[in-house]
Image (cartoon, rainbow, N blue to C red):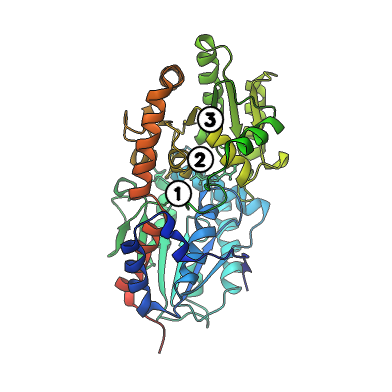
Amino acid sequence: MLERVPLLEKDLDDYRSVVDYEVLDRIHELAEPLKGAKVLHLNATAYGGGVAELLATHVPLLRSVGIDADWRVLHGSDEFFHVTKTAHNGLQGAEVEWTPELQRVYLERVLDNALAMDDGWDFVVIHDPQPAALLSFLRETPVFSPETRWIWRCHIDLTTANARVWEFFRPFVELHDASVWTMREFVPASLVMDRVIVTPPCIDPLAVKNLDLADPFVVEICKQYGIDTKRPIMCQVSRFDPWKDPVGVIEAYRLVREEIPDVQLVLAGSMATDDPEGFKVWEEAEEARGGDRDIHLLSNIQQIGAVQINAFQRAAHVVLQKSLREGFGLTVSEALWKGRPVVGGRAGGIQLQIRDGVDGFLVDSVEEAATRTVELLSFPERADELGASGRAHVRANFLSTRELEDWLRLFHDLGSGTRP
Ligand code: UDP
């Protein structure tokens, strides 16, 4: 059996404190005929990055409405994750060598995982390219059941996908009964599939990362990391990944410092287990930092967890998410939910979350990121105004309850209910 991820307990009714009763009633009603359905979510990592963050809430919420949901992760290896990161980069538009040897490593490992699958699922949701070929192998095994509905959830931006890499994955994806995307623009024109659903991810307002924190607690946590909450703070929270452009953020900070000399930068990022590039990008950021004590380069190695991220996002006067490519970028909604304005790269799902000039600013360069940051640091009332509007935008569009409702509708559509 594939490794099962331990789950938190969540109760949908606790969300009464943040969303309207009608939303919860609708969800309970949609869930009623699906009670007892067996749903499996399968992805590559239990920790680090947005997909793990989403599933940590979504799967317990499914369980709280009576669905027998489970979360499992692929059994990978350093070599496999190196190959899947190459595929990920290629699908996001990078020039990569997608050689027969890489394809062999990928397929062999997915086959191993297919052989470890158990049966009895009503719905299986496969996340991203790492397990995308699993169904093709499983169809040849005795555990395959034609009654199971298979869904491929793509979290990445395929608008400029490297054609060789996408053409490799496309036949595997097309075996699924449906695919789910963050934005319509991400869906390649070549995809042949009856059910293509667009529904963006969301954040959990009741997760430790997003709960209200009292100011003295925020100040104390920042102090422990040498961050002075009395001075201006800009902050980006991201995996150390070239697409998140941490070096660009440092360059923007340097330009900001020319105008606002006492500014500090917090760059916090975890190392995901399926992301072998993390240490290399960390070193690049460390080099760009050049020993500047006002740049706080932090990771889970210094025990940066959900509470710390929560505190940094709240303490920040401006949050950045200067991505060059982005599927969605949960960190944007996380910051907006805390009433902080966000300066975000004009990329993928960041554009869904930031209405330019309303909740923050969309930028195309280091210079623009710096100019907008200076503007927000110079006019705190305006910054608060944008932050408040961002929080309302997130409440209406990007909370876990909205996503739960969308998924229940999809399950209905695909054939509701448990097996006879
Ligand atoms: N995150 C975290 N610690 C870190 C860096 C990131 O907990 O040091 C979280 C972040 O708060 C967010 C998720 O990881 O919830 C990243 O999701 P996002 O969609 O922004 O990016 P992805 O990593 O999926 O590309």
The percent position of residue 271, horizontal first and vertical second, equals 64, 43
Residue type (three-letter) at the residue carrying disc 3 = Ala
Q: Is residue 163 above or below residue 226?
A: below
User: What residue is shown with label 2?
Assistant: 96
Residue indicated by mark 1: 165
Amino acid carrying label 2: it is Val
Determine the CA span between mark 1 and mark 2: 9 Å
Residue 186's tag is: none
For discs 3 and 1, the disc positioned in front in the rendered view: 3
Secondary structure under tag 1 reads helix
The residue to which callout 3 is attached is: 316
Residue 104's x, y, as percent? 57, 57
Mark 3, secondary structure of its residue: loop
Using the image, determine if residue 416 lies above or below residue 199. Answer: below
Q: Which structural element holds mark 2?
A: loop
* Residue 340 or residue 148, whichever sits in front: 340
The span from disc 3 to disc 1 (Cα, nearest Å) is 39 Å
Asked whether the viewer can see residue 177, the reply is: no
